[in-house]
Amino acid sequence: MAKKSPPKTFEDAIARLEAITQSMQNNAQPLEEALENYAEGVELVRYCQQKLAAVEQKIQVLDHGDLKDWELEGE
């Protein structure tokens, strides 16, 4: 199984995950391909989790170490 290069953006990773999910739900692929797509999906989820954790850390730094709930104005 060839290792694919990581996505360029978080949004690219989400789009690819959606495509993999849709393809697997349609049962339109052989077992080997489904397994490869599953493995790719796991890697994409890890990538997204790392990106989200990095953003969360930046937000904490911007808020002086305190992570606060974001509220819309007027609520």
Image (cartoon, rainbow, N blue to C red):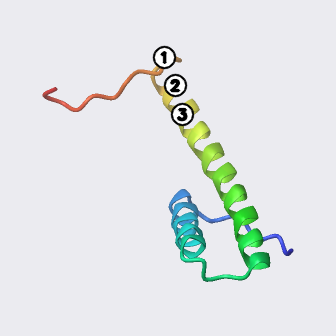
- Mark number, residue 66: 1
Q: Amino acid at mark 3?
A: Glu
- Which quadrant, please, contains the C terminus? top left
Amino acid type at mark 2: Gln
CB-based contact (under 8 Å), mark 3 and mark 2 = yes
Tell me what residue is drawn at x 85 percent, y 75 percent. 2
Q: Residue at x 49, y 31 (%)?
A: 59
Q: Mark 3 to mark 1: distance in Å?
A: 11 Å
Q: Dot 2: within a 10 Å radius of its alpha carbon, few (fewer than 14), some, or many (20 or more) residues? A: some
**Residue 18 vs residue 24: left or right?**
left
- Placement of 67 over or under 38, stated as above or below: above
Among the 4 quarters of the image, the one containing residue 50: top right
Disc 1 on helix, strand or loop? loop
Query: CA separation, marks 3 and 2?
Result: 6 Å
Image position of 58 with respect to 41: above or below: above
What's the mark number on residue 60? 2
Residue position for label 3: 56
Q: Quadrant of residue 23?
A: bottom right
Residue 26 vs residue 63, the one in the foreground: 26
